[in-house]
Every structure is written in C-alpha cells, then in structure tokens.
Amino acid sequence: MNGPKTSVEVGGMGHNIKRKEDARFIRGQGKYTDDVVLPGMLHMDIVRSPYAYAKIKSINTDNAMAIPGVHAVITGEVLEGYNLHWMPTLMSDTQMVLPTDTVMYQSQEVAAVIADDRYIAADGVEAVEVEYEPMQAVVDPFKAMEADAPVLRTDKEGKTDNHIWHWETGDAEKTEEAFQAADVVVKEKVYLPRIHVASIETCGCVASFDPVEGKLTVWMTTQAPHAIRTVVALVAGHVGLSEEKIRIISPDIGGGFGGKVPVYPGYVIAIASSVVIGKPVKWVEDRSENLQADSFARDYHMDVELAASNSGKMEALRIKTVADHGYTDAAANPSKYPAGMFSICTGSYDIKNAFTEMDAYYTNKPPGGIAYRCSFRVTEAVHAIERIVDVLALKLGRDPADLRMQNFIQPEDFPYQSALGWEYDSGNYPRALKLAMEKIGYEELRREQKEKRERGELMGIGISSFTEIVGAGPSKDFDILGIKMFDSCELRIHPTGKAIARFGTKSQGQGHETTYAQILAEELGIPSSQIQIEEGDTDTAPYGLGTYASRSTPTAGAAAAKAAHKIREKARKIAAHLLEASEEDLEWEVGKFFVKGSPEQAKTIQEIAFAAYTNHPQGLEPGLEATHYYDPPNMTFPFGSYICVVDIDRKTGEIKIRRFVAIDDCGNIINPMIVEGQIHGGLTQGLAPAMYEELIYDEQGNILNGSFMDYLLPTSVETPNWETEQTITPSPHHPLGAKGVAESPTVGAPPAIANAVVDALSHLGVENIDIPITPFKVWQVFQEKGAAA
Amino acid sequence: MIPPPYEYLNPNQLSEAISLLQKHGEEAKILAGGHSLIPAMKLRFALPEYLIDISGIEGMDFLREEEGQLRIGAMSRESSLEESELISEKYPLLLDTAKMIADPQVRNMATVGGNLAHGDPANDHPAAMIALRARVVVEGPNGSREIGIDDFFTDFFTTALQNNEILTEIKIPAAPPNSGGSYQKIERKVGDYAAAAVACQLSFDAGGTIQQIGIGLTNVGPIPLRSNSAEDHLRGQIPDDSLIRESGRLAAEDCDPVDDLRGSAEYKRDLVNELTQRAIKISIERSERGS
C-alpha cells in the first residue's frame, strides 16, 4: 500500500488519526463497570479459601448476618437451591460457582456477602466462619498423572484419574521415519510458566434484575458480551432468565488480554444475588483476588525435538506437551481445538513432517488456560519452535539467522500448506529478517560479540522469526459452545450523510472507535470523524463473538468493509436515479458516483444519503442501512522478525537489553499509529514473562507471589527502547488485505529475549534457560557451569 | 484500602500526639507517610483502632547542617532528600539511597523517620544510617532521648522505640572533607525491596588513609546489619584492589541472608560481596572528586 488513498479530511485507512476514545480516557471520563451506580445498589465481597484443597466441614454465617447493613450471605447451599452451584466452562468442562463440600484451589470462592456498602461487605466476609479439613494438594501435573495420585475431580462420576484430554495432530509415523533417517536430532525440555493477565481494571459486574419486567441487565467486564448473554440464557434458563430478557453491557474496559473472556463465579453469584434480592448488586474484584483466583495463562511443559540434515535442512518436528489446567479446563479455545492453535508450531519454516501431541491434567491450582494476548496457545508454540531452532544452530555450529534463512517458507510458496494442516495465506519471511538484520547491524554485532567473548564479557544476540495465526475463524472449523466464530457490522447512514455502525466485537483498548470508522471512511468516503462506532450492548449491537485472539480486524473489520459495499450497491441505484443514468454507467471513486466519461456529473455519498430519505427511487426501499455477518474463509497469518541484544553482568547476573528491533508484518495497515502502539504494548507484555512474571506455588498449593510486590510487572524503567518497523504483505483473502496484529509482539518477543541470553552463555555449555530469565537464574548458571567470575 | 473501622486522630502538637499514644497504647499507630502502614491495613494485617496522623505537627520536616551535624526531621519526605542541594553536594550516600527507594510517587509521601521506625530490614535507609553512624532522636512522655543507630534495630521489625515514643529526628555527623559514599542495590524491578544492598560511607585523611568507614547491609539478616569486619579491614589503610576485594568477602561473611523469591542465601552473599566492593570503589571515587 503506497500511502493513504483518502484525504486527511476523509481519514480512511493509513492515516495516523488520534484515537477518538482518548478524549474521554485522558480526561478520566471513561465509563467503566465500577463507575456504574444505581439507586439502591448493594455491594458484594467474596470469602475465599485459604487452602488449595480442603473439605468444607461447616460454614457459619450468623456473625456476618448480625452486622448491620449485611443483607445476605450466599453459600453453595443457597445456590444449590436454585441448581446454580455449578456452571459449564467454555470448554464444556464444569466449574463450581460456590462449593457445597470441597475447595479445589487457594482463593477459590467459598461464600459471598451482600451488604449496603463495600466496607460492610468486607467486614461481613471477615465474620463468616468456615471450618476446613485440609487435604494434601496435587500441584504438579507430573504428580497428578501418577497412578497413585488422588483423583481430584470426584464430582465427575466414574473418573479414575486426573487426565482431562489427549489431543494430537500430524503424521506420527512419517515423522518418526524422518527422525530415524535424519543426520541430526536436537531435543529440549521447554517450560512456559503459569502467568497472569494483569489488566489495569480487574473483573467485576453490576447485575440489576428488574422484578417487575423480569429483565436482567448486567454491566460486565467482558470481551464477549453476546456470547455471555447466550451462556446466561442457557445456564439460567431454568430459573426463568430468557435470552430476550437478558441485556449484557460491556462498558469501557481497562484491558482484557483474554482474561475477560471466561465467566467467573463472581459474575454468576452477583447475578443470582440480584435476582434473589431484587436489587442491583455490584461486585468488583480487588487486585489480589484478580491475581490469585482468575484464569491463568500458559503452563505448558513441552518436550521439543527437531530433526535436520547435516547441511541444516529441517526435516521433522515433534512436540509432546503436558498441559496443567488447574482445577478445571476453563480455557476459551474454539471447541474443536482444546490446545488452541498450537499446531502453528512448525512456525515460519518449511518442515515437511510434524507431529504434536498433548495431555491435559487437573491440579489444585486456579482454573484456566486462557489465551493471554495470544491467539490460543500460539505463544507456547512459537516459543517451542524458536528456541529449538537456536538449539539446532548451536549443535550444527551455524549462525541462527543463516539457519532460519535456509529453512524459511519462501515468498513464492504461498498459499502454503503446513504439515499440521494450516493454509498460510501470505508472507515474506526473508524480507522481514533481512530488514531486522540491517536495522540492528547484525554482522557488526556478531564481530563485537566475538571480541567481547575473548575478553570474558557476556553479550548475546537473539532472533525470533515467528508466524502467528489469528482471526478465528472459518465456520467450518471454529465455534465456541457451538456458536460459529463470525463477526458482524450493522451500518446506518443518516440523512445528512453521517453514520453510526455497531459491531459484535468489544474494544478493551484496541481503538475500534477509531479504526472501524477509518475502514468505513475508506469504503464510503464519509469522514471517519463523522462515523460513530458502538459496541458492547447486546440490546443494540449485532451478534458477534467478541474481541480476543486478534480477531476483530480479520472478522468485524471485514464485516465493516462488506457492509459498506452493500451500502454502495444501494447508493449506486439512488445515484443512477438522481443522475438519470443507468447503474452500469456509474463509477465509484472515494465518496461519490460519477457518470463514466463525464466526472462533473456526480453525486456524493452525502447527497445520495439525503435522497435515500427524501427522494428515493420508487420501487426501492427508502433508507440506507446494511448489515453484514462475516464468516472468514481462512485465518490470517501475520509474522515478524525480532532481534534482541543483551549484555550480562558477569558478577550479578543482571541482564540489560541493549537493543530490540521488531519488524512486524500485519498486511495492510488501518492506522499506523495504533499499530505501533499495539506493538509497543505487546512487546512489553512479551518482555514481562521473558524476564519477570511467573505465578509460583508451594507444595501445598499456596501462591507465593500473590501480590504485585512479588508478581513482577515490568514498568517503563525496565522496558527497553523498542525499535519498530513494518513490512507489508497483504492478506489475499481479507477484503482490506489486513491481518490481526496486537498479539504478534507478545508471541514473538519472549523467544528473542531467551535466545539472546542463551546466546550470551552458549559457550559455557548452555542450551536452554526457561523463562522468566532472572539475574538469579543467570547467577545459578554461572555456579553450575563453573563460570563464576 | 478497605479496612475495618478505625478512628483518625490528627494532633497538631507533638506533646498531644504522645499523650494520645499513652492513652491508646497498643491500639494506636502513628501515621507518617503511610507507605508501610497503609499496605498492611489494606491487607488487614495491621488493624489499628486509632491512627495518629503526625503530618500536621509543625517542625518535624527539616533538613539542615548545624554544629557539625546533618539534622533530618523525621517527617522529611524522601523526595526532599532527592531535591536537596546540601544532600546532593555532600551526602551522595543519602542521595543514592533516596533515589533507590520504591518509586517517585511513594517518595513524595514516604518519610525518612517512617522508613527507620518501621524496623523493616528490607528498607533502604537503615543501612545508610548505619554507614553514616547516625543517632536517632525520640520523644516520649519524659522528654527526648538519643539512640545510636547500632542500638536502634533490636529484632525483626522491632526497634528500641517504646510504645509511647515518637521518632522526631535523625542526626548524622557532618561529612568531613575528603569523604564519599555510595548505596549499591540489586532489586528485581524498580520499586522492589533489595535482593541485597550495601551502603558505604568513608573519609580519608590528608595522606590518603581511610580514617572513617561505615558499611551497612540491607535485607540480608533479620535486622539491618553493620559489617564490622569489612570496616576494620579498611580502617587506617590506603585502599587497593586486594583490600577492597577482601572487604567484600568479609562483608559477605558478616551477613545472614535466607532463601526466598529474591534468590538463595548463597546468591545474596555473593551479591553482598560484589556490591560491597562496588560501593567502596564508588565512595573512593566520589571522595577524590570532592577533594
């Protein structure tokens, strides 16, 4: 794409338009769930388990109920009376809303106190007396799989072990043959630790049941309001909540990153409380609850093997994974993909043989497996392949850039059929890596590293050339609880030529109010400043599956373009009527139809819109509206090449990221400034697990770092200067040639950093260090390898 | 913060604050900058029934040199150390320390007195005050008394401060000519407590011999520590690389760290060794620059 096609005034694709939503956000005028205040509203706080695994012997609520201002204490027994004490997860597993007899992880919800204000509710929580009988928790999935391990899910009839599911894909036999025949095989155990989505806003809701109308309205921190409405209707249909009487509103959301896709027990308890008490109930988690109890991400133990010829040609890839899902499988993957898009693990390389298998286990840890800023387990897959490629380079004595170049899928190979079944839409991997190498001065850095190594100084260069898979997804394969993963746009052009468009997605900071308007401006010539974008209210917006997994631009963005095309088709008829010309004689150029050969005979979209309401051709419906539900024909495959340079202190193990160059390719770009912001944010969320973040549990299942004192979120001080640039390889099947982008950097950054640190230490015999790579871990490597200075 | 109910008291006289302390005894807590107390109240670990806010009392926020002493009012905010010309010209150790405490927002509220009175071995000022050989002034019902810094920290989160006393001032011997100092801290991220940190303050005589030296250690024992053996090894010596190296080793021997999320005890000892050497070297550089 060579610069924007539209003028600055129209502000279509490619313009660096400041985000419309920032006007309210930077003034502190956003309206978040916790800003919702209703007359008579009550407040909820939750009693949580101090134990990871325990029998509940008794719950005494008398003292709590005696506190003035406490209205109710909701227990599992209370909910059982309505058959609401259990709920399904999005993966068709089951989860307690509140326990009746057993708690399965530390910080699990045990009871809820409903009170006049938040302070009284907290006092009530403290006054609830719960008697527990602790049991020996199973924390490690490798212990959970042992034959004599206690069976944790005794609620499941006939369950005799802690195994959840087995999943595999690829050709095991052919892959084994390729391994047998290969010159070189490298193997590595790679663990991607359990981490947490730490969005600025925690989760919460205001549930308001109107007993007269029988209507439930819920303001809720959810990335997928429409799906939630259907889930509530399915789960609570038996107590009289029917889908037309349920309204879910996602107001402004302070970051989601996948953590606001699941249905947490707190939402259900608040809804049930409101229905029972007949008053609005607000529940907003505090930071510790959010960190300790809400869905985790990652936690994959991967055995990765790569086979190659002596000349470096990659022949086969095999990955065997143990997935720790905690107490229940509460991931939010498409139904047919229990391990998400993990099968993108052949990455950017032409590997003809591949096989991957996975076994998921229950443990006494919080449930989850959510896709933290990653399109369903892609982070895990990318880390595995990008790490093992470096291990192979080390084994063969090859430069890791050179080895990647040799094995890349070539630009002319697209569309490319991967060994694990994906059709990659487009890419130019050598161009991205070459640009990254030029920008960072790769050859010179390698020379410097050689000199430094001779002087005993530790410097490393790490590369990650990843391929993402986003935009779920085509209806033939993609659904959640049976609902197909399309998305939608409903577009109305007003008589004066302005517009409003509503979508099934929900921005949590992605800037949809700006970018969707730019797409429509591009397609219709109506200035993007005059197009209002709305999302998140199920009573007004068209149905859609929401925003996660970088799917909004690939699905709803495409729906916007298609809806605009429908508008244009009708506009052509109206223009023909106004110009007294035949439709075939009209040509479209941004913002107007004109008669072929006489461009002065033209009608602007604004004139046409006015006519649609004042002077429409007889026989044609008046008005100018269109709706489109977009079912994508394929996923989109954004990619990039990152290079990271680190210097390591020989004494303290401290790691300094000296430079980080990120080349991203997300096809055609809607708003370059927003894309750059997305990449900066994503890179920082890639830095976080690479060097700082991990949820740590002891053998009893106690979380050891349950607050931001010890769960280390990097700040601007820790964040290096990101040097970003783009290449553009349009998607051939997306109406705008666009791909998703926001997750690429989160997925791509961790292996670049890990590879750089390992590269700095590889001459000491280091092949892999699991993230997060801390100074203490590096110091331990010094001790172990006898390299202490 | 969602604490249980408590009563907020804001006296404007020190004497009034002390009588409130006497009246309410263990049920009362002094609120200075609040950056240790409020997090504990938020988690309902600290459950005071009375909060006695001393920020309204005149004359507790000052910073001046007089009669051979640097005098720091207990209510001086950390940020005022950072902004003080006196501190940045003559007390680089204090400047280093103030800059390493938490983050700017915290430093705008947190006080030097509170940082000491909390008795947390992970706080940064205690080691600096040990290196500077400070004296702490406390006021109680029977008037004021001074406590040497080495007698102030008595046990884990415990100080020589009585229940009815308030820390009012810190006195530090004025830095003689040809002195320098440094605070070296390893933290996991900005705002974290130290995995280990070392404070050094030293001064030379005209012949280049170390006349005075103080070395304090942060978060490597149940209380903030002084490394006597490292100090003894350097005092009266003209420092060279091997003396400095040995001092690092001795400081590492003097400390008593435990394994935790910040690393193993062995790692922390190794950090103390390295950071001691770095703190000494930088202190020497700074003293020469000052001379």
Image (cartoon, grey):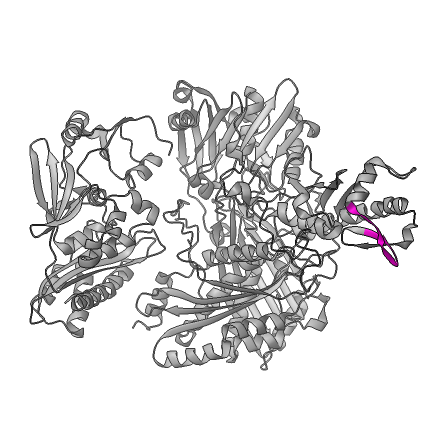
Q: Which residues are magenta?
A: A593-605
Percent across and percent down for residue A645 are: 45, 69
Does A700 appear in magenta?
no
Q: Quadrant of residue B109?
A: top left
Residue located 35% across and 61% down the image? A776
Provide residue B257's location: percent of width, then percent of height. 24, 55
Q: Nearer the viewer, residue A539 or B272?
A: A539
Rendered-image quadrant of the N terminus of chain A: bottom right
Q: Does any portion of residue A584 appear in the rendered image?
A: yes
Left or right, residue A168 beside residue A393: right
From where the camera sits, is residue A377 visible? Answer: no
| Magenta residues, dominant SS class | strand
- Image-quadrant location for residue A540: top right
Q: Nearer the viewer, residue A34 or A781?
A: A34
Q: Is residue A185 above or below residue B199?
A: below
**A12 and B173: which one is in front?**
A12
Give the x, y percent position of residue B268.
27, 59
Give the side of residue A147 with respect to residue B252, left or right: right
Nearest to the observer: residue A272 or residue A509: A509
**Side of A687 relative to B15 (left or right):** right
Q: Residue furthest front?
A: A600
**Is residue A600 part of the magenta span, yes or no?**
yes
A562 with respect to A472 (left or right): right
Q: Quadrant of the C terminus of chain A?
A: bottom left
Q: Position of residue B11 (x, y in %)?
A: 21, 28
Q: Quarter-wise, where is residue A493 in the image?
A: top right
